[in-house]
């Protein structure tokens, strides 16, 4: 295997790792957004119940 082939394989692996990291980040952001929404709703419920 030539140095170019090795470099191409490493680049491909790095691209795959970046894609996986982006997917994990997107999922984490969705979970964070859902948690913030749940917190917001819970705070609204608490405020509504206190009135």
Image (cartoon, rainbow, N blue to C red):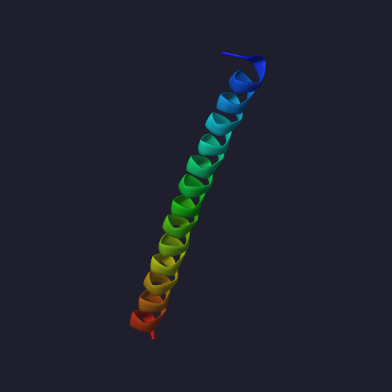
Q: Splitting the image into 4 quarters, where does residue 35 fall?
A: bottom left
| Residue found 55% across the figure and 25% down from its top | 9
Task: Please give left or right for residue 9 compared with residue 38 in the image.
Answer: right
Image position of 3 (left or right of 15)? right
Which quadrant is home to the C terminus? bottom left
Residue at figure coordinates x 59%, y 19% from the top left: 6
Q: Nearer the viewer, residue 22 or 49?
A: 22
Front one among 41 and 15: 15
**Among all residues in the image, which is located at the extreme bottom?**
51
Residue 10 picture location, percent across and down? 58, 25
How many badges with numbers are in the image?
Answer: 0
* Residue 43: % across, % down: 42, 72
The single residue placed furthest to the front in the displayed view is 2
Quadrant holding the N terminus: top right
Residue 42: x and y in percent read 37, 70
Residue in view at x 33 percent, y 81 percent:
49
Provide residue 32's location: percent of width, then percent of height. 47, 57
Q: Nearer the viewer, residue 24 or 15?
A: 15
In the rendered image of this protein, does residue 10 appear above or below residue 45?
Answer: above
């Amino acid at each position: 295997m030539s140095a170019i082939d090795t470099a191409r394989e490493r680049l491909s692996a790095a691209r795959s790792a970046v894609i996986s990291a982006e997917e994990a980040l997107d999922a984490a952001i969705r979970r964070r957004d859902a948690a913030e929404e749940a917190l917001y709703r819970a705070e609204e419920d608490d405020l509504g119940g206190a009135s």
